[in-house]
Amino acid sequence: MSWQLSPEARHASDHAGIGYDGGGPWSPAAEPAPVWHLGKLVTMIRGRFPWARDIGTTRHDQGVVSRTRGRERSLHAVGRAADVMVPRQSLAGPEGTSLANWLVENAQALGVQLVIWDHSVWQGSSRPERRFTPYSGPNPHVDHVHVELTAAPGPVFAHEALYLLGPTPRYVARDAGGQESESNALAVLIVVAIVAASVRKGGRGPGFWRLLGGAL
């Protein structure tokens, strides 16, 4: 294996216990359905690793074949996987290794269940001696770090789930004009806060409708 776990990542790996959540049965008609906490993870990665600008998330594909469960949807198709491309001059280089190790170090908190990088794969659900093994897939993953999340958000994000009314709209790494794009849930949270304030006041005071303009 080329990717070597840092001491911190090795310690986290030895104490990990993260169940693997698959993508469910594959169907050619199924649409990618991204989860909101993947967008949160992408934002965290970009903030901590400035070189990580090109990040792919959801896509249609032909699924993956499990020896025990048959063909399943890939984690990209269900919106719980991201491919973080490394700079072209740094194939299998320190940038990808630092990101891969950071994901393993914080896997329990982030809800990371699998990482593939530089001919190696880390799986939180395997027995300790089998969590970090050579990767034999057709793509050696020397140009990008592949990361998968559990179905439920990790503890870092779990508190935010209480304030969301539904799945966060799709996170897109780059739009047609080359700009980053992410749906904003702030407007929803503001409306919810205004409604809650109005209910607490029993309809007196500013009230919900008066806060919207007073002319209704």
Image (spheres, rainbow, N blue to C red):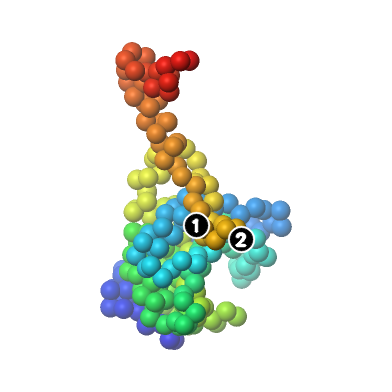
Where residue 36 appears, as percent x and y from the top left, is 47, 50
Instruction: Residue at the far top: name it.
Output: 204
Asked whether disc 2 touches disc 1, contact meaning CB atoms under 8 Å apart, the reply is no
Circle 2 sits in a helix, a strand or a loop, which is it? loop
Q: With 141 as the anchor, is 26 left or right in this view?
A: right
Residue 2 picture location, percent across and down = 43, 86
Identify which amino acid the numbered label 1 is placed on: Glu
Q: Amino acid at mark 2?
A: Arg
Q: Is residue 123 visible?
A: no
Q: Would you say 102 lies left or right of 179 here? A: left
Residue drawn where x is 46% and y is 66% of the image: 53
* Disc assigned to residue 180: 1
Name above or below for residue 89 compared with residue 9. below
Residue where numbered disc 2 is placed: 59
Query: In the rendering, at what x and y percent does residue 19 appear?
Result: 44, 61
| In this view, 61 is above or below 86 | above
Q: Residue at x 60, y 80 (%)?
A: 138
* Dot 1: element: loop
Q: Is residue 21 left or right of residue 128?
A: right
Q: Quadrant of the N terminus?
A: bottom left
Mark 2, other Cα within 10 Å: few <14 / some 14–19 / many ≥20 = some
Residue name at image x 42 percent, y 16 percent: 214
- 205 on left or right of 143: left
| Residue at point 43%, 23% (across, down) | 212
Q: Residue furthest right?
A: 28
Q: Nearer the viewer, mark 2 or mark 1?
A: 1
Q: Looking at the image, can residue 40 be seen? A: yes
Q: Classify 10 Å Cα crowding around label 1: few (below 14), some (14-19), many (20 and above).
A: few
Q: Quadrant of residue 188?
A: top left
* Distance between the alpha carbons at the discs numbered 2 and 1: 17 Å
